Image: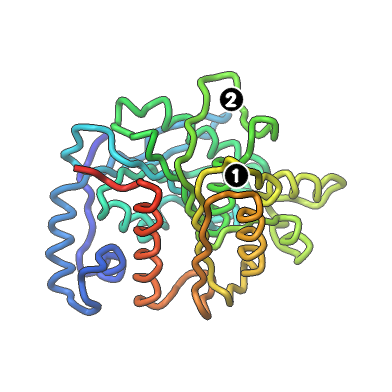
Amino acid sequence: MKTRCRWNPSAGLGLLLLAVPAVGLGEERSSRVWAAQFYSHFETIPNLTYKVVGRDELKLDLYRRSDVTKPVPTLLFIHGGGWERQSKSDVLGNILPWLEMGWTVVNVDYRLAGTAPAPAAVEDCLSALRWVGQHAKQYGFDLDRLVISGASAGGELALMIGMAPASAGLDPDASTPPLPQAAAIVNVSGITDIVDLIQRGRAVGWIPRGPNREELARRLSPLTYVRPGLPPILTIHGDADPSVPYEQAVRFHAALTKAGVANQLFTIPGGKHGGHPPQMTLRMYETLRAFLAEHHLTVTE
């Protein structure tokens, strides 16, 4: 079912400000005007089923301009939550800036650790990526300008489905039409070395203790798949992140650079695991826009 996006302009003021760099902080009237324009120009198609696993129907939401007449750049976004919590409804603040830039956004849910442990979430996100490829013509996805992004655990999942080769054996539907290739990946505070994380006593719910735990963790770590020929990667990470060590982002950046992969590390000074001050958040999105422009991934009228 297709519906108009229904944002509450006053309740969502903070999110709207992040999406509109031209609006000064505290200018509620300008944000309300932008919200009204947003409401009139965008629509959402919620809860499209992209995969059925047993009794579970896995869903995604589609957000796009209501006047789309040709393929436009498309973002596949994956929520975080340590693979154990949250859902696609928790990340609207992350996707608003992309919608403001005119992108189509595919916002994905996947099986959490309580339902299915690793590598189920990676398998699901690969299926969502394949769904995007299969429905590109129907919904106007521009597969030449397809970006994958996620935050925290979603950053790990975004990197995995954009980086892992077929030989990793993680694609449950490898015999069906090939996966579309990402034109770029945007990793926000994502985990790149799960071996390091479990050695710190984390990710226990997603990768339960067992004899092959470290082997599985290595297989699901984006750092394992760094090699020449990957799409451009932007990593955004706070250097005081208490949940995902900033040092992971530094090592990942260094490995990509050594492999000759176009990449950028944007460090948020004093940044925690999200919840950054408004001015720093605006700088983050300015960096994102510059990164997309550098790699010719912008909306052209």
233 left or right of 8 in image? right
Residue at image position (39%, 64%) is 287
Front residue (pair 292, 94): 292
Residue beneath disc 1: 160
Q: Nearer the viewer, mark 1 or mark 2?
A: 1
Question: Can residue 66 be seen in the rendering of this structure?
Answer: yes
Q: Which mark is residue 173?
A: 2
156 left or right of 68 in image? right
| Three-letter amino acid code of the residue under disc 1 | Met
Q: Position of residue 212 (x, y in %)?
A: 84, 45
User: In the rendered view of the protein, which quadrant contains the C terminus?
Assistant: top left
Callout 2: few (<14), some (14-19), or many (20+) C-alpha neighbours within 10 Å?
A: few
Residue at image position (31%, 67%) is 18
Q: CA distance from mark 1 to mark 2?
A: 16 Å
Q: Position of residue 60 (x, y in %)?
A: 41, 40
Which quadrant of the figure has residue 189? bottom right
Q: Considering only vertical position in the picture, is 293 above or below 63? A: below
Question: Circle 1 — which element?
Answer: helix
